[in-house]
Image (cartoon, rainbow, N blue to C red):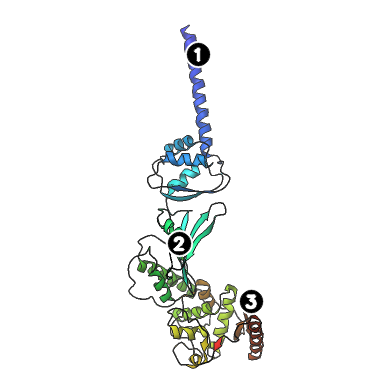
Amino acid sequence: MWRSIASNALTLMIVVVFLLGGLVLWGQGQYTDRGPLLEAICVRVQPGARLSAVSEDLVERGAVTSGKILRIGADYTKKTNQLKAGSFLVPPHASMEQIVDILTRGGANTCGTEIVYRIGVNSSSVQVRELDPGTNRYVQKAEFDPAADAPVPAEFTEMRERDDTRYRVAMAEGVTSWQVVDTLSRVDVLEGEVATVPPEGMLAPDSYEVRVGDSRQALLDRMQAAQEATLAAAWQDRAEGLPYDTPEEALVMASIIEKETGVAEERPQVASVFINRLEQGMKLQTDPTVIYGITNGQGVLGRGLRQSELRRETPYNTYVIDGLPPTPIANPGRASIEAALRPAATDFIFFVADGTGGHAFARTLAEHNENVAKWREIERQRGEAAGGTQTD
């Protein structure tokens, strides 16, 4: 009898072991298999949040089938107490294992809200944006001019109070160093004074992530280091026979190219025009340099050039001086720097707007005059003032 009892007990133990093994394998499969989430969601983890609350939120939102299995898996991998505060994008069909990794990995937020301080050529603005997890695109919630005497949108105040809001400073191509420093003085998440305006042209246009309390000077240093690296790389890869003795001279040319066209594919052609003029001993004759001589880069002129200004002798009036002006006239982007150092091979020495946002290029003055006539007709049809200049 005892032998029978022992045999039955052993059988039962084996069955229990197999059942437990099967249960473990099933749970492991549940933890690592594709999840039920049909569309991406943004999961916000509050500072000090516990995994139990987060897991139940994931269940309610259809991201996982069992909060308990998620917690057991996180405990087994020793990640239960490693939750990071912030907002994190959970992709469709993410497994529990992937979700735990996303919520415990740390680093920058991958979704949620973002406040962008934009430094533009003609104006600056603050944009409040929120990521739409379904499209993985930001949706603008509000925008305002920080220099304007107007109430700040409620969305901005609300986002500023959230712990997971990210901040960016987005610097456009073609802005001046003075404009950058002036705008940064109104970026309220940054701190500290800027002793001097950085050299013109030596700040890299880009989007920079910043944190509350970051130094304005430290951000400018990042911008300058990035531009130095871009210029050095482009100079190393430059074409032969260019009319520049130093990288700084190439940067001056790049800034002129930047101000003359916003069409990316045109930049090598525009570069070729100015290089051809230099090589033929012609004056550059470009309006943006004249404007810089008037404004010193401190804001925009806001009107057309006067004939007297085109005749006035200043270090930046390329209708009067020979060669390049003494410094850049703006901060050029990478594409303009590369165009200045690897220009297109053309015979063009003239260009004028063609009415499409681009330019018509010409090899001779006769061709150029025909293009100018076409452009003036387009202006006339649009009801705009012909020529873009004013007389005194």
Going by the numbered disc 1, the residue's amino acid type is: Asn
Q: Which residue is mark 1?
A: 8
- Could you tell me which secondary element the residue under label 2 belongs to? loop
Horizontal placement of 86 versus 364: left or right? left
Q: Which residue is mark 3?
A: 356
Horizontal placement of 217 versus 208: left or right? left
Going by the numbered disc 3, the residue's amino acid type is: Thr
- Lower sequence index among marks 2 and 3: 2
Disc 1 and disc 2: Cα gap in Å? 75 Å
Instruction: Indicate the position of residue 20 as horizontal and vertical percent values.
Output: 49, 26
Instruction: Indicate the position of residue 266 as horizontal and vertical percent values.
Output: 59, 76
- Could you tell me which secondary element the residue under label 3 belongs to? loop
25, above or below 44, in the image: above
**Rendering quarter of residue 350:** bottom right
Q: Residues within 10 Å of mark 3 (few under 14, many from 20)?
A: few
Q: Residue at x 64, y 80 (%)?
A: 382
Between 85 and 321, the one nearer to me in the picture: 85
